[in-house]
Image (cartoon, rainbow, N blue to C red):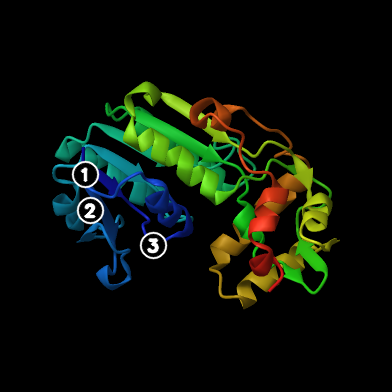
Amino acid sequence: MTILITGATGNVSSALLRALPSTENVRVLVRDPAKAPEGVEVFAGDLDHPETLTEAFAGVDTLWLLTAMGPQAPHASGNAVWAARQAGVKHIVRLSAIGASHDAPTRNGRLHALSDLELQASGIPWTIIRPAFFMQNLFGSVNGDTLYGGLGEGRVGFIDIRDIAEFGARILTDPAPHAGKVYTLTGPESISLHEAAAAAGARYQQVPEDAVLQAMLDAGFPEWDAKVSVEYGRAYARNWGDYTTGDFTEVVGRRARTFADFAGDHAAQLRP
């Protein structure tokens, strides 16, 4: 069974490659082959340019479909689904977004809903994974003994990227039982940034929306991404993400990592 991984240089797909039991018969699609991970078959291509996808998709059985956040995401996802149809791909595992729907409180969530629907109507067996707020998104948010964040007093079912990767690897290596299923992945607890900060040995300082936006722009994030992150923060502050699910445990057979687990494993990155 040949597996094709998109987004292979990003955090989630990189972790997924490490979580797979073997990278034999695994290939990756990257824009720049010089940045491709080692130990896998590499194809140069870009989901924004469908003419570059034919060779990479030929002979693929299962596709891991991850698109970069941005207004072009449905275009990229649609190109991948079309290339998969032409190549006879047998199953697509799509990384979507938490709460993706036509009335999601963020543009990102609404765009993911469009891509989810297109995949569901494609005629290709599919599985959709919708992960909660990544714990790793808090890297760089601690300065001294303070964790700065824009989630207000909201509670969130944070998920560790390593758990998303392990979950995805389980689906990719045996996709048939998961055909037609939408999984929402959270950690085992819904916590506030006060509790997250305490686990990291810090205290939480709320940051106003305009300051969050400016900080992201100063850090080099695209304006669209920065503004959508503010939209997410506003939704989380209203407890939009205050829930957990049992989907991870149902598939993997253990509980997902708690934030305390994550903070212990990544103390140096949380408190550089």
Which quadrant is home to the N terminus? top left
Q: Which mark is residue 196?
A: none
Q: Which residue is mark 1?
A: 83
Q: CA distance from mark 1 to mark 3?
A: 21 Å
Q: Toward the viewer: 194 or 109?
A: 194
Three-letter amino acid code of the residue under disc 1: Ala
| Residue carrying label 3 | 9
The answer to whether the residues at label 2 and label 3 have Cβ atoms under 8 Å apart is no
- Is 62 situated left or right of 127 in this image? left
Instruction: Tell me the residue at 39%/34% (across/down).
Output: 171
Q: Are marks 1 and 3 in contact (CB under 8 Å)?
A: no
Q: Check disc 3 and give the amino acid type.
A: Thr
- Rounded to the nearest angstrom, the CA distance separating label 2 from label 3 is 19 Å
Badge 1 or badge 2: first in the primary sequence: 2
User: Mark 3, residues whose alpha carbon is within 10 Å: few (<14), some, or many (≥20)?
Assistant: some
Q: Position of residue 144 (x, y in %)?
A: 80, 74
Q: Nearer the viewer, mark 2 or mark 3?
A: 3
Task: Give 52 or 104, whichever is nearer the viewer.
Answer: 52
Which residue is at a point 69% across and 56% down the rendered structure image?
Answer: 264
